């Protein structure tokens, strides 16, 4: 996600990337529901259900990407993705706020440690008072907040996941189209760009979102969110190999501190 987003943002604005990528995400989910015979479930829902599904999707498939693309256009892809990886912790926070899961001392310490990790990631630029880096970090932090809300809401309301994701990305595509029409920023992508948008929309957006929502149905938010921390280490490798970004000591140390926070949160009173 970090690598593909950075490559696409090199030639287009964040809203243009969101518009084109959400089109392919919507198309992927339409075809998925069509070939699995899932579209017939649309008639099982009332207008109220559609509105709730759209409301649930806004923080996770619209606002999340607005903030992430804005942050990724400012920060190196590796930094943006590491700060973005506050979202599993935000999932735990909003599970406590919205789902009434218990906020334990262990969870509170884990959150504090993970915040420290984000500070370490951006500290090298902050000592030079780089306000642009601060803005990028705040954007990536707010995208984590949005996805935390999205994760909690998906556990609160139980709708068919493929249908929900289809409606979510259809709404995102409509909103992004409206914004780009207003700004006069609609464009016809080249073949290379179209392939990039197709990959970004189908796999890092639609498929990833749907499988994440399925995963949440199998256990508690905190336990499932921990597994997501495997990926930023791989992301550092991809950004170094493809984007030729230097892996800084701050990025590695900060990421390790964030994951330390997760290990603290993962601890159980009884161990086998």
Image (cartoon, rainbow, N blue to C red):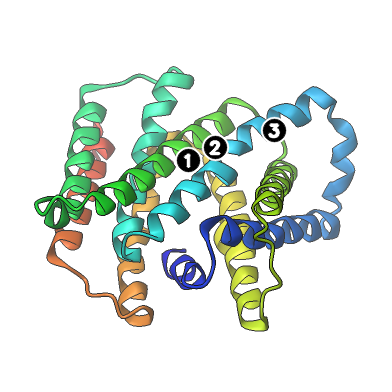
Whether 190 is drawn above or below 215: the answer is below
Q: Residues within 10 Å of mark 1 (few under 14, many from 20)?
A: many
Quarter-of-image position of residue 256:
bottom left
Which label sits on residue 59? 2
- The residues bearing labels 1 and 3 have C-alpha atoms spaced at a distance of 15 Å
Q: Which residue is mark 3?
A: 53
Sequence-wise first label, 1 or 2: 2
Quarter-of-image position of residue 145:
top left
Q: Nearer the viewer, residue 188 or 199?
A: 188
Q: Is residue 185 left or right of residue 90?
A: right
Q: Residue at x 69, y 68 (%)?
A: 187
Q: Residues within 10 Å of mark 3 (few under 14, many from 20)?
A: many
Q: Nearer the viewer, residue 216 or 178?
A: 178
| Residue contact at pointers 1 and 2, CB within 8 angstroms | yes
Q: Is residue 205 left or right of residue 241?
A: right
Which label sits on residue 185? none
Q: Residue at x 39, y 40 (%)?
A: 142
Q: Residue at x 78, y 23 (%)?
A: 48
Q: Which residue is mark 1?
A: 147
Q: Residue at x 71, y 43 (%)?
A: 171
Q: Give how far across and how far down residue 17 sits, in percent.
A: 57, 62
Q: Nearer the viewer, residue 215 or 185?
A: 185
SS category of the residue bearing label 1: helix
Sequence-wise first label, 2 or 3: 3
Sequence-wise first label, 1 or 3: 3
Whether 119 is drawn above or below 58: the answer is below
- The residues bearing labels 1 and 2 have C-alpha atoms spaced at a distance of 6 Å
């Amino acid at each position: 996600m970090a690598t593909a987003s950075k490559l696409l943002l090199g030639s287009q604005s964040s809203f243009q990337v969101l518009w084109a990528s959400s089109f392919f995400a919507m198309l992927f989910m339409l075809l998925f529901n069509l070939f699995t015979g899932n579209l017939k479930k649309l008639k099982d829902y009332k207008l109220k259900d559609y509105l709730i599904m759209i409301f649930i999707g806004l923080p996770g498939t619209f606002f999340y990407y607005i903030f992430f693309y804005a942050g990724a256009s400012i920060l190196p892809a590796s930094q943006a993705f590491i700060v973005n990886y506050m979202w599993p912790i935000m999932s735990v926070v909003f599970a406590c706020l919205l789902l009434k899961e218990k906020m334990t001392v262990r969870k509170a310490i884990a959150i504090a440690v993970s915040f420290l990790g984000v500070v370490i990631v951006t500290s090298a630029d902050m000592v030079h008072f780089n306000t642009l880096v601060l803005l990028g970090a705040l954007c990536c932090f707010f995208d984590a907040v949005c996805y935390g809300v999205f994760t909690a809401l998906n556990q609160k309301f139980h709708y068919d996941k493929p249908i929900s994701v289809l409606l979510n990305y259809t709404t995102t595509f409509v909103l992004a189209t409206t914004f780009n029409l207003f700004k006069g920023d609609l464009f016809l992508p080249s073949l290379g760009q179209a392939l990039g948008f197709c990959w970004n929309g189908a796999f890092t957006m639609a498929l990833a979102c749907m499988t994440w929502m399925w995963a949440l149905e199998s256990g508690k938010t905190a336990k499932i969110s921990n597994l997501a921390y495997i990926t930023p280490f791989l992301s550092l490798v991809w950004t170094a190999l493809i984007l030729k970004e230097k892996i800084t000591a701050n990025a590695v140390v900060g990421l390790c501190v964030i994951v330390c926070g997760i290990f603290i949160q993962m601890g159980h009173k009884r161990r086998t």
